[in-house]
Amino acid sequence: MGYIIFVGYDTDAERKRIDYLLEKWSGRAVIKKPRGTVIHIETEELNEFLEELFSKLEGDVEEKVEIYEAKPVRRKVETRRRKLEYSIPEEKKVVERFVEYLMSKLNASFAGADALAKVYSAYTRKGRATIKVIVLGNGTSRVLFEVEGFGEAVDFLAEKIDEELKLFAGG
């Protein structure tokens, strides 16, 4: 069964990542990225629309136009989530500075904060994920990380965070 997937993107970097994905999947699936335009139309008067469309084209319309019936596929891909928690024998300010260093090392950019947590966005070769960080404590600090995203990015980032935090915490 074939699917038509409409993907919107905002930047050239997103477009390039999509192109890379299509190239990666080209050995596993039949993928067409048509030149021209993709039209999704819902009408009772399809033949009238096609007649007008064909009249606008030059050359053989049979070679230029492919028509498929389409219905929305409601497949919700669940986000993956990993939670990590550490107890570190350091002052809260020291731990917060380390977390900022770690986020920088992971190329995670600050995305926002609330009264309790800071949220970062990270893009890796494995994909994109958000990292929510909560640092609590006096003297000894508790650090909570919640990594959320799709695919391999979640485990990849969680493993990197775990490795760095264990080294920082002394074991």
Image: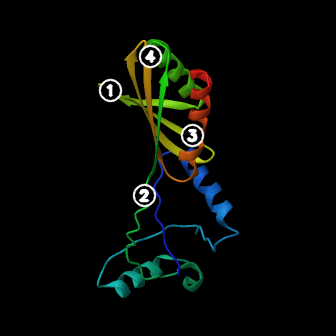
Assess whether mark 4 and mark 3 are in contact (beta carbons under 8 angstroms).
no
Type of amino acid at the residue the image marks with label 4: Thr
Assess whether mark 1 and mark 2 are in contact (beta carbons under 8 angstroms).
no
User: 10 Å neighbourhood of mark 1: few (<14), some, or many (≥20)?
Assistant: few
Q: Secondary structure at mark 2?
A: loop
Give the Cα distance between marks 4 and 1.
Answer: 17 Å
Give the Cα distance between marks 1 and 3.
Answer: 21 Å
Sequence-first disc among 2 and 1: 2
User: 10 Å neighbourhood of mark 2: few (<14), some, or many (≥20)?
Assistant: few
Snapshot quadrant of residue 35:
bottom right
Type of amino acid at the residue the image marks with label 1: Leu
Which residue position is annotated with label 4?
140
Between 61 and 9, the one nearer to me in the picture: 9
Sequence-first disc among 4 and 2: 2
Assess whether mark 3 and mark 1 are in contact (beta carbons under 8 angstroms).
no
Sequence-first disc among 3 and 4: 4
Snapshot quadrant of residue 91:
top left
Q: Whole-percent x and y of residue 18?
A: 58, 55
Q: Secondary structure at mark 4?
A: strand
Image position of 39 with respect to 22: above or below: below
Which residue position is annotated with label 3?
157
Image position of 134 with respect to 75: above or below: above
Sequence-first disc among 1 and 3: 1
Give the Cα distance between marks 3 and 4.
Answer: 25 Å
Type of amino acid at the residue the image marks with label 2: Glu
Type of amino acid at the residue the image marks with label 3: Leu
Give the Cα distance between marks 2 and 1.
Answer: 25 Å
Which residue position is annotated with label 1?
116
State the residue at coordinates (51%, 23%): 99
Q: Secondary structure at mark 3?
A: helix
State the residue at coordinates (54%, 67%): 36
